[in-house]
Image (spheres, rainbow, N blue to C red):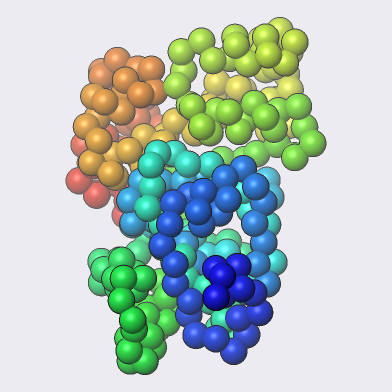
Amino acid sequence: MEISELFEGTASQQLSVRNGSVAGIFGEQGSEIRSAGRYVFVSQGGVWVRVGRCAYGVSRHWGLWLPPAVVCFAYPMMDSSLVELGVPNALSRLLPSTVCVPRCPRDFCAALKEAGARERHPDAERSLESQLVSAITDALAIPERLVVTMPSYGSRLAVVCEAVLRNPSKVGQLDKTAAALGVSVRTLGRLFKEELGTSAANWRRGVQIAMACCALDNGIPASEVAAMLGYGAGAFSTFFRSRLGYSPREQALGRGQRR
C-alpha cells in the first residue's frame, strides 16, 4: 500500500505511523492537507510549520497536532527526524479543533520513537492512543517564543519572511532583502509595520529566539548557536536573556522549556 493511500480516509483505521524527514512528512514548501488529523513528533532537530498567519517552531521532543483539513507549509530549521501519527476521524473528533504544540512527556517520547520501528500489539496501540490524547488535551498555551506572525500568502513580505525562517542570521540580511524587493530598507520597515505590526528587525529576532531554543534543545553549544545567528557569545547571551528572562544555559538544561 502506498503511503498516500494509508492516510486517506482513515475513519475506521487505528493510528497509522510513519517516520521521515521534514520533506518526507510535510513536503518541503508545498501545502499539505489531510482529511483526518495527524500528530507530528520531532525526535531530532526542528521544523517551522506555517498554518494560516502563524508559524510554529517545533523543536526536539515537542509535537504538533494538526486537526483535519488544516493546510500547512513546512520549513526545516536543521536536519530533522520526525514521527507522524495518522489519527482516525473518530479520535480526531475528541481532540481540539485548533493547532496545538505540546511538549511530550518522556514516556511518550520513547513510545513514539519505537512506534514506527516494530509491529505494535493492540495493547500498545491503545496505550499510544491514550498518551496522545493526554499530551494534546493537557497541553498548555503555546509559548510565545515558539510562534511568529506571518504575512498573508499574497504579500510581498511572504517570500522575505520564508527566507528569514530558513536563515535567520542577522548579518546584512535586511539590506539584501530590501535590494531583492527593489525597495529601500526604510520602505521594507514600513511594510513590516503595516502588515505585521512590528519592525523587520524585531520580527527577525522572534525567529532567532525560536531557532536558538531549538538548537540548544538539540545539544548545540551556545557559542555555536551565537555564531549561527551572527552574534558574539556575550551579545547572544544578553539578547537571549533580554527576550526570555533566563540564560541559554538554562534552556540547554531544559529549565526554560517549562516556562
Report the residue that reaches farthest toward the front.
1
Which residue reaches farthest bottom? 122
Picture coordinates of residue 159, whole percent (x, y): 67, 29
Q: Position of residue 143 (x, y in %)?
A: 45, 50
Q: Quadrant of residue 88?
A: bottom right
Name the residue rendered at 23%, 41% in the picture.
Answer: 219
| Residue 222, above or below 12 | above
Q: Is residue 218 above or below residue 3?
A: above
Q: Residue at x 48, y 76 (%)?
A: 16
Where is residue 244, by image quadrant?
A: top left
Viewed as shown, does residue 232 lie left or right of 229?
left
Residue 7 seen anywhere in this rendered image of the structure: no
Quarter of the image for residue 130 reads: bottom left
Q: Tell me, yes or no, if residue 226 can be seen here.
A: yes
- Residue sitting at x 58%, y 50%: 27
* Quadrant of the rendering where the N terminus is positioned: bottom right
Return the residue nearer the eye: 60 or 31.
31
Tell which of 17 and 183 is nearer to you: 17
Residue 257 to residue 220: above or below = below
Q: Position of residue 186 (x, y in %)?
A: 69, 10
- Looking at the image, residue 258 sits to the left or right of residue 38; the answer is left
Residue 40 in the image: state x and y as whole percent.
47, 62
